[in-house]
Image (cartoon, rainbow, N blue to C red):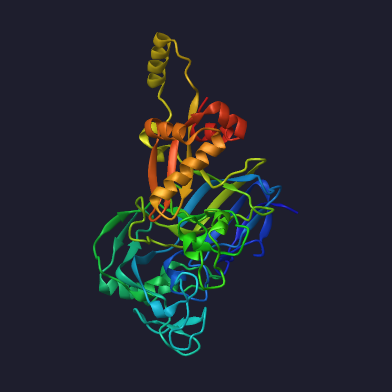
């Protein structure tokens, strides 16, 4: 029997796919409450996790069939960690089979996906259970440890003494969920940039639906997914199979409380999962990583029948819309009406919508976003380009290749697709 609320506190081993057991089902219109584990760095330092992240066990949504879409309203995103560590990475080439996010191995005994344990703190503290050799596939080139205030408004980066204190109580400092197996990243105790102050604005780096084949979670995107093409490990794919990702790994900082993400259904029930919560991030995630934290996300899911999507569609909070895409004020509407009367033009009713694009580069991601928009809205790509240029804007999600293309689309078409009620409610439109 479907439940109104499904509580999730279990995780995958980093792999998403149709054979991964799902929780639920949750009712159409019901809620998912997820206790999420930190994303990138902790799992990256834990080679038994095979996906580079540690995301929640997927939830089946009642009534979601292949070819439908699921609207995921983000009710809240609350950080529970006291702080975390992050920074730019360097890969140990002898500690992986082709891809350090996916196929970690011990450089001494050669064990693939080895279980590990902590011995002390610092770069070499993560050791192979089998032979005791340092086995983390990554280290920092420049790293920091950051602590948050009790209200979770700001973070300050710590000096060597503070980073060491956090490292000695890593799981408690990060409030790592009980069922998480990752090594706490703070155990490395980086402290290269003490005294910085950063505002917090938490969001979900991973949110989406399950792909049709076994896929490492961090590579469930059109940019990171390219690393799977021809890969030597068991999760290698062909170029043609890359289209099967669902772009759940976006690292788009607008996927935050108040926004709605609309995702394609590729397997029965959809399989909604979440993870990789971040405390803050500027556009682009230029360092390659940001502040991975534990937290609690509350989501409301609704099925949109017959809405076949090539990739996610985002309905951001109004504050996050590009200036040109924001709804018109009453004064602007009046000015437009007067001009329309003067020139005898019938005004189009339009509203903002944001398309996610992914690809091997930012240029490829932009092309992807525009093609997805054109396909869904029944326009040509040049028409999308024009709308994007004068009624919206392009924004980087993550380098090397995620972006959002936001612009105003005709309300008539949004109604036809079943999207108008969501957009109207989001922006209080008439």
Question: Looking at the image, which residue is at 41% across and 38% down?
Answer: 321
Check the image and report above or below for 53 versus 118: above
Indicate whether 48 appears above or below 18: below
Q: Is residue 249 above or below residue 428?
A: below
In the displayed structure image, the side of residue 213 where residue 163 appears, left or right: left
133 vs 385: above or below: below
Horizontal and vertical percent position of residue 419 = 58, 35
Residue 429: x, y in percent? 50, 28
Residue at figure coordinates x 59%, y 30% from the top left: 415
**Foreground residue, 106 or 366?**
366
Picture coordinates of residue 311, whole percent (x, y): 54, 47
The residue located at (43%, 41%) in the rendering is 405
Q: Position of residue 339 (x, y in %)?
A: 38, 13
| Residue most extreme to the bottom | 131
Q: How many tags in the picture? A: 0
From this viewpoint, is residue 103 visible?
yes
Res 196 quadrant in image: bottom left
Q: On the picture, is 142 further left or further right than 333?
A: left
Residue 258 visible somewhere in the drawing: no
**Extreme residue in the right direction:** 1
Residue at coordinates 36% horizontally, 61% vertically from top-left? 288
Point out the image quarter for the N terminus: bottom right
Residue 320 falls in image quadrant: top left
Q: Could you say which is closer to the camera, residue 91 or residue 54?
A: 91
In this view, the residue in front, 99 or 341, is 99
């Amino acid at each position: 029997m479907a439940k109104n609320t499904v509580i999730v506190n279990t995780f995958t081993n980093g792999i998403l796919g149709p054979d991964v057991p799902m929780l639920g089902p949750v009712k159409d219109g019901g809620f998912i409450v997820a206790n999420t584990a930190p994303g990138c760095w902790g799992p990256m330092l834990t080679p038994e996790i095979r996906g580079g992240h540690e995301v929640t066990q997927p939830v089946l949504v009642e009534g979601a069939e292949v070819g439908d879409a699921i609207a995921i309203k983000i009710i809240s995103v609350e950080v529970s960690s006291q702080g975390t560590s992050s920074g730019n990475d360097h890969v140990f080439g002898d500690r992986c089979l082709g891809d350090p996010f996916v196929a970690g191995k011990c450089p001494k005994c050669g064990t693939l996906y080895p279980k590990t344990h902590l011995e002390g703190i610092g770069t070499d503290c993560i050791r192979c259970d089998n032979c005791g050799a340092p086995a983390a596939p990554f280290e920092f080139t420049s790293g920091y440890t950051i602590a948050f205030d009790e209200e979770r408004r700001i973070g300050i980066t710590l000096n060597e003494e503070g980073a060491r204190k956090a490292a000695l109580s890593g799981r408690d400092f990060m409030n790592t969920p009980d069922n998480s197996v990752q090594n706490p990243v703070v155990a490395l105790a980086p402290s290269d940039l003490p005294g910085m102050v950063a505002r917090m604005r938490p969001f979900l780096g991973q949110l989406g639906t399950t792909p049709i084949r076994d896929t490492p979670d961090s590579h469930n995107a059109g940019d990171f997914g390219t690393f799977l093409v021809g890969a030597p490990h068991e999760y290698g794919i062909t170029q043609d199979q890359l289209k099967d990702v669902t772009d759940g790994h976006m690292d788009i900082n607008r996927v935050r409380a108040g926004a709605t993400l609309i995702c394609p259904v590729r397997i029965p029930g959809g399989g909604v999962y979440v993870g990789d919560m971040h405390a803050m991030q500027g556009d682009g995630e230029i360092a390659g990583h940001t502040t991975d934290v534990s937290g609690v996300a509350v989501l409301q899911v609704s099925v949109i029948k017959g809405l076949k999507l090539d990739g996610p569609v985002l309905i951001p909070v109004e504050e996050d819309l590009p200036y040109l895409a924001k709804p018109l004020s009453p004064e602007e509407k009046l000015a437009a009406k007067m001009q329309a009367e003067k020139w005898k033009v019938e005004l189009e009713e339009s509203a903002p919508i944001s398309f996610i694009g992914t690809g091997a580069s930012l240029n490829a991601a932009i092309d992807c976003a525009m093609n997805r928009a054109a396909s869904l809205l029944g326009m040509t790509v040049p028409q999308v380009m024009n709308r994007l240029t004068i009624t919206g804007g392009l924004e980087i999600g993550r380098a090397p290749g995620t972006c959002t293309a936001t612009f105003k689309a005709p309300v008539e078409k949004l109604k036809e697709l079943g999207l108008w009620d969501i957009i109207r409610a989001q922006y209080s439109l008439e």
